[in-house]
Image (tube, grey):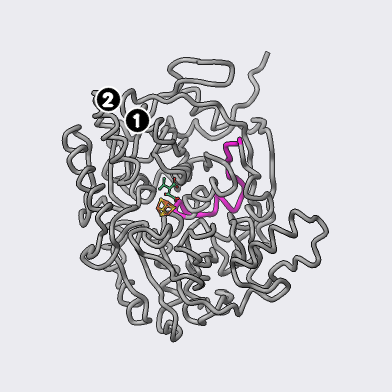
Amino acid sequence: MEQPGRTMLAKIWDQHVIAQISDDTDLLHVDRHLLHDLGGSRGLLDLKSRGLTVHNPELTFATPDHAISTARGRAGTIKIGQELLAALRVETSASGIQLFDVDEPGQGIVHVIGPELGLSLPGCLIVCGDSHTCTHGGLGALAFGIGSSELTHVLATQALIQRRPKTMRVKFEGKLALGVTAKDLILALIGYVGAAGGTGYAVEYAGSAIRDLPVEGRLTICNLSIELGAKMGMVAPDEKTFEYIRGRRYAPQGVMWEQAVSAWRQLPSDPDAVFDREVVIDVDKIIPQVTWGISPEHVVGVDGRIPDPKTIDDPARRAAIETALDYMGLKGGALIAGTPVDWVFIGSCTNSRLSDLRAAAEVARGRKVAPGVRAWIVPGSETVKRDAVAEGLDKIFTDAGFEWREPGCSMCLAANGETVAPGQRSVSTSNRNFIGRQGPRARTHLASPASAVAAAISGAIADARTMER
Ligand SMILES: CC(C)[C@H](C(=O)O)[C@@H](O)C(=O)O
Ligand code: SF4
């Protein structure tokens, strides 16, 4: 009998099985373990307290990102951040783990540096104690976040027990209109399927619009997989992926490169592979998206209206919308565009790569941040920062009135006291608009870098398409 087609998930998964635990659960080998300053430091200390050692330090890489100040010169890293960084330095050095330390090339948000250094490769199984590890799936890796006890387990064994997820394919078909970005695609998808629409699935993003996207856009799409409930998101590797990886610091070289590429060409799902769920999105209909509420699924097109609870029959949905509007200080039924903003944050593992900063600079060039608005640019890594400076992007931003900062997570999760003030409203290129995410009572609207700059310049939520040149 002919073998049925296999999904990319099945191919990568099966290559990593060390032992079958039960029908749907396996012990998997981990190819790359990434550590950050919150979970990483704690995991290494936990391992030590149990008298264990790191099984494969050469497959483990660390960087501080969450708990460090992003002020110039790293001024004002709070005590806990300093302690975590000190522990990360001591414990990685004692275990022989490569640390990309502050102000060194290689440092940055862990999900920005993995791809940038060529650590994240197609077909690799990558874990990190961080839910946005799904980002690395943009290169065709099987990448997912793990909890703290799993993290210690991986440090000690380089293996992990996992239940095989169901598979979901999302096809984005059509062409992106001018001013519409990868971020808008994924926000529109979350609006369509809901923030739990991907729960229990590994999502494969496919379709003509995904093929057309540059690799960094695919990373942005995969980054928000967890915001639709999916631990894993992935895009089949193609020639763009290989070109992106070629020559990076940890990428295979020479004969190894040729062998790797031919193995990677086998990874995409077979044409007759069957998925447990299929969704098709018509990309031609998507315009820039902006969230209005306290979940990424609370999203509308920038020309749209905030939902009016009065028009909602289902009492539970009506109450949820009322709660969101109350927190956000918004009126149901009003247009989202024109909502005044106090803060703009361009950064996070979603949208802080060089292409994001270029897109933002394109809108910012020659314009000024509106009076009363504070706008930050936080590059995703030291390398992104240096590359952006070499292109003069920092100058475009500072001339326009933006603050240019050091790489780290920063205001994405109100780290290190980098917060939006209570009651103030921010447009943010990050991935979570939960209650208190950017500070107590802070109000967050998620959007693309171009939309965030448009808001900074206008002093209100605005349609970036009117500012594209
Ligand atoms: C701190 C970390 C564990 C957390 C995550 O898992 O995602 C953070 O990165 C976030 O974005 O909320
Ligand atoms: S940038 Fe934000 S979402 Fe990404 S790892 Fe840091 S805190 Fe988490």
Q: Give the answer, above or below, for where 173 lies relative to 17.
A: below
Q: Position of residue 197 (x, y in %)?
A: 66, 44
Front residue of 255 and 80: 80
Q: Count residues near mark 1 (Cα–Cα under 10 Å), then give few for <14, some for 14-19, many for 20+.
A: many
Q: Position of residue 438 (x, y in %)?
A: 45, 62
- Looking at the image, residue 124 sits to the left or right of residue 285; the answer is left
Q: What residue type is disc 1 on?
A: Thr
- Looking at the image, residue 293 sits to the left or right of residue 457; the answer is right
CA gap, disc 1 and disc 2: 10 Å
**Quarter of the N terminus within the rendering:** top right
Tag 1–tag 2 contact (CB < 8 Å): yes
What residue sits right under mark 2 in the picture?
50
Q: Position of residue 281 (x, y in %)?
A: 68, 52
Q: Count residues near mark 2 (Cα–Cα under 10 Å), then give few for <14, some for 14-19, many for 20+.
A: few
Label annotation for residue 152: 1
Q: Tell whether position 334 is magenta.
A: no
First along the sequence among labels 1 and 2: 2
Point out the stretch of residues depicted in magenta.
200-216
